C-alpha cells in the first residue's frame, strides 16, 4: 500500500500566533507538498522520487526553515543541510553547510547516486554540485524578510525568535511505493543564530534521517543535539527489526520515552513497507501531513486536530 | 573490571611492507598509547580521561592517520575529524574539517562539555577552539614527508597509496573504568586525496563512534561510507541492548555479516561495562591493542598474531 507523510518541523508557532488565517496558509503548503509526492507514488514511481518531490516543494516555500525559508546563522548567513536514504539498498547521501544550492535534498540525492561518498560539506559540497551541473543560486534567494526579522530579534535577545519558531523548523518526508520500498529525506536551515559551524541531526544518517526496508523510513525534527545522541531515526527502525515492535509503537517508545528521557524535544514521521504510518512528537505541536492508499488523509499542527 | 582497547586503523600496511623492524615501530606506538590509557584507569580516573589520553598519543605519533600523521586532501591540505562519547549520559562531542588543532579528540571533548552542540565543523569549529583558549597549531605541524609522498603518489595514479595504507588509517580507543562507565573516541585524517569536503564515519555518532552503558562503547575504522550506512557503532550496542548478544557476538555479527553484506571493509573495537572486549575486523589486518585487569594483554596487526 502506497503511503507518504511529511513534516514541517516540531517547533510550530506559539498557539496564539497560529490564527485561522495563518493556519490556512501553512495547511495549504503542507497539502501541496503532500499531494505532489502522493501523485508520484500513484503513477507507480519510486518512494525516492516521491519524497524528493515533496521536500523540494517544502524547500521552495518560504514558510519552512529549509531551502528558501532557511533561518540565518549568527553572522547573518544561510547554511543548509539535507539527507536522503533509500530502504532497499541502505544507500544514502547528505550535504551540510550549503550556501548556494536551491534544493539541498536534490544535491543529497546526487551525492548518493553519483559520488562514492555519503556526506559532503561546505565549499567542497558546492564544488561537487558545480561538477554535477547543478545551477547555483545567489544567496539572496534565501533572504526572506521574515527570517531576517527573526534574526534581528534573536540578536537583541528575544529568545522566542530563536526557539519556538526556528529551532525546530526542519522539513522532511517518508514514503513507501508500490514495490514496497521505503525512503526518507530531511532538509533544514538549522537554528536561528547558529554558530561555530554547528551541524544538526538532519544530514546525519541514523540521527535525523534513516530508511531500511527491514524496519521503516524515518525523518525526525527537533532539538538536533538530542536526536543525534539518541540516534533517533535508526532507533525507530532498530526497535522494529530487533524487538518486533510496530512502527507506531517504536515511534512512541523513541519519542516519548528515550528522547524525552534525555530531555530532548522533537518528533518524527515514519512509514514501514506495509504502508503503516507514525507521526509522533513530544513538543506542543508538529506541522505534519499524511496520505495513504487506505484513505487516511491528515493535515495537522497540534495533537487534538488529529482525527 | 577496568579494560581498554585501541586501534590504529583497519587498513594496515601490505604484508610484505610490514617487516619485523617496521612492526616493532608500530607495536611500540600502540603499546605506548595503550599503557598510558590503562595507567589512567588504574589510578581510578574515568574512562573518558583514559581514552582521551590514548588518542592524544596516537594523534601526536606521525605513524597514524590522525592528528600529526594525517593524510592530505586532494588539494594538499590536512583536514581532521574526531568524536568522543560517554556511555553513562549519552553525551557526545565531535569536530570535522579542522586544519589547526593539534589534538582533535580534546576539542571534541570541549564541544561535549562546554557547548550546547554535538558536532562543529570547519572554520566555525576553530572559532570555538579559539574561544575556549585552545592553542592553534600552524598547519606545518601536520606536514610529514611520508604522507606528502603518499599524496604525490596518489596524484600520479598509484592506487595503493590511497587505499591500503591511508584509506582506513583512523585511530580510536574504548575503555571501561572502575565505576563501570564506558567511553569511546575516534580521530582521523580521512582519506588520502579526499575532496568535496567529504566527512567520513569517525566524527558521526552512531557510525564511527558510540558509547552506552546499557550496551557498549565502540570505535570503528574502515571504508567510512559503509560504516555510516550500516550505523556500525550504534549497531553493536543495539544488538546487545535489544537482542542480548555478548559484545563479542554483536561485534562479529556487525562486522562479518552486516558490514560485509553491504560490501564494506573495516573493523571495530568495543568494550562493555563488565570489561569484556571485542576486536573484530573483516580486512586483512587491523592495528590494535588491548589490556584488561584480568591480565589480557594483546598487541597485534593481522589475525594470526592474536593468541
Image (cartoon, coloured by chain):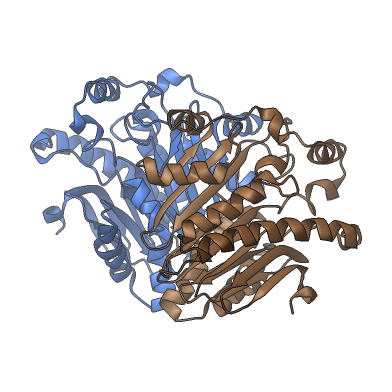
Chain colours: A blue, B brown
User: Who's the residue at 62% across and 70% down the image?
Assistant: B291
Between B26 and A264, the residue placed more toward the observer is B26
Q: Is residue B137 left or right of residue B285?
A: left
Q: Is residue A213 left or right of residue A174?
A: right
Between A73 and B23, the residue placed more toward the observer is B23
User: Who's the residue at 36% across and 25% down the image?
Assistant: A74
Q: Is residue B184 left or right of residue B28?
A: left
B215, above or below B70, in the image:
below
Q: Is residue A146 left or right of residue A227?
A: left
Give residue B132's position: percent from left, percent from top. 43, 33
| Quadrant assignment, res B305 | bottom right
| Quadrant assignment, res B142 | top right
Residue placed furthest toward the front = B43
Marker count (numbered): 0
Give residue B211's position: percent from left, percent from top. 46, 62
Q: Can the viewer see residue B205 in this picture?
A: no
Q: Can the viewer see residue A21 in this picture?
A: yes
Between B171 and A248, the residue placed more toward the observer is B171
B174, above or below A102, in the image:
below
Q: Quadrant of the C terminus of chain B?
A: bottom right
Give residue A127's position: percent from left, percent from top. 62, 30
Amino acid at each position: 500500500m502506497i503511503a507518504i507523510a511529511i513534516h514541517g518541523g516540531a517547533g510550530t508557532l506559539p498557539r496564539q500566533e497560529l490564527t485561522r488565517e495563518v493556519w490556512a496558509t501553512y495547511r495549504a503548503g503542507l497539502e501541496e507538498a503532500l499531494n505532489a509526492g502522493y501523485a508520484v507514488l500513484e503513477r507507480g514511481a519510486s518512494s525516492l522520487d516521491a519524497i524528493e518531490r515533496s521536500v523540494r516543494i517544502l524547500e521552495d516555500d518560504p514558510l519552512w526553515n529549509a531551502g528558501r525559508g532557511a533561518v540565518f546563522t549568527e553572522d547573518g548567513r544561510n547554511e543548509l543541510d539535507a539527507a536522503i536514504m533509500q530502504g532497499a539498498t541502505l544507500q544514502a547521501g547528505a550535504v551540510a553547510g550549503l550556501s548556494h544550492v536551491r534544493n539541498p535534498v536534490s544535491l543529497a540525492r546526487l551525492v548518493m547516486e553519483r559520488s562514492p561518498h555519503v556526506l559532503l560539506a561546505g565549499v567542497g559540497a558546492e564544488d561537487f554540485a558545480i561538477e554535477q551541473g547543478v545551477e547555483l543560486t545567489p544567496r539572496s534567494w534565501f533572504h526572506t524578510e521574515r527570517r531576517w526579522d527573526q534574526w534581528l530579534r534573536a540578536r537583541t535577545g528575544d529568545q522566542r525568535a530563536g526557539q519556538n519558531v526556528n529551532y525546530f523548523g526542519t522539513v522532511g518526508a517518508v514514503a513507501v511505493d508500490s514495490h514496497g520500498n521505503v525512503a526518507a529525506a530531511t532538509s533544514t536551515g538549522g537554528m536561528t543564530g547558529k554558530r561555530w559551524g554547528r551541524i544538526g541531526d538532519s544530514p546525519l544518517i541514523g540521527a535525523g534521517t534513516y530508511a531500511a526496508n527491514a524496519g521503516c523510513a524515518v525523518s525526525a525534527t527537533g532539538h538536533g543535539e538530542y536526536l543525534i545522541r539518541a540516534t533517533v531515526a535508526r532507533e525507530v527502525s532498530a526497535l522494529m527489526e530487533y524487538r518486533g515492535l510496530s512502527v507506531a509503537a517504536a515511534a512512541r517508545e523513541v519519542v516519548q520515552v528515550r528522547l524525552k528521557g534525555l530531555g530532548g524535544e522533537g518528533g518524527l514521521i515514519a512509514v514501514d513497507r506495509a504502508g503503516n504510518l507514525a507521526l509522533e512528537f513530544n513538543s506542543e505541536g508538529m506541522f505534519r501531513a499524511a496520505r495513504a492508499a487506505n484513505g487516511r488523509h491528515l493535515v495537522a499542527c497540534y495533537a487534538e486536530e488529529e482525527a
